[in-house]
Amino acid sequence: MAAELAPPSFFESSLPVRAHVHPALNSRYSRTMPKFTHHVFICNNHRLPDDPKVSCNADGSGELQQAFKKALAVRGLSRTIRSNKAGCLDQCEHGPTVVVYPEAVWYGNVTPADVDEIVESHLVGGKPLERLVIADACLNTARCEHKPRRN
Ligand code: FES
Ligand SMILES: [Zn+2]
């Protein structure tokens, strides 16, 4: 017979989502689900050719995300590092765009040829690949040297 689970207390219900999973369920999940060390979000957004904005997945092939998936798989990292297709990450002018969490390191102008280097340097070696990191001044700003001026 399954044990009764008490409803979360007021304190537990005010915690972040992951923290207020009932302790009995938390321990069950921790035994059966792999813990991801990183999530890699790869912009897979595809805009039509007549759209004035650029897009990271311009040819619609999703080649960049596939390259990450393959690079992780050949290193046996797929169970601990997740490569996720993402919609527009609002960094179109810096794209193709990739962001790695939990470090929140943003990469721009990423091509499939860069993927092995990002995986080896950042995800295996713990050192972000500086040459592709988007400058802080370019993030969360309406204007930077790469964004077209809006009058
Ligand atoms: S289309 Fe990739 S960040 Fe916008
Ligand atoms: Zn910029």
Image: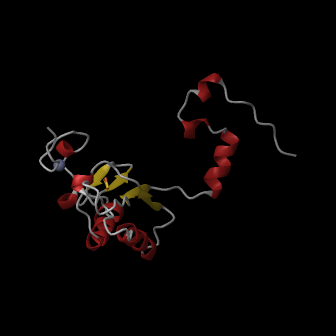
Along the line of sight, the residue nearer the viewer: 124 or 82: 82
* On screen, residue 137 above or below 54: above
Q: Which residue is situated farthest in the bottom direction here? A: 74
Residue at (30, 61) in percent of width and height:
56
On screen, residue 112 versus residue 18, left or right, reads left
Quadrant where the image shows the C terminus: top left
* On screen, residue 12 above or below 132: above
Q: Position of residue 100 (x, y in %)?
A: 35, 54
Along the line of sight, the residue nearer the viewer: 14 or 32: 14
On screen, residue 145 versus residue 126, left or right, reads left
Residue at (45, 55) in percent of width and height:
37
Colouring style: secondary structure
Q: Which of the 4 image quarters holds residue 143?
A: top left
Residue at (45, 68) in percent of width and height:
77
Q: Which of the 4 image quarters holds residue 108?
A: bottom left
On screen, residue 127 versus residue 31, left or right, reads left
* On screen, residue 92 above or below 10: below
Q: Which residue is situated farthest in the right direction here? A: 1
Residue at (68, 44) in percent of width and height:
25
Q: Which residue is situated farthest in the top direction here? A: 10
Along the line of sight, the residue nearer the viewer: 49 or 74: 49
Q: Position of residue 39 (x, y in %)?
A: 42, 55
Q: Position of residue 46 (x, y in %)?
A: 36, 61
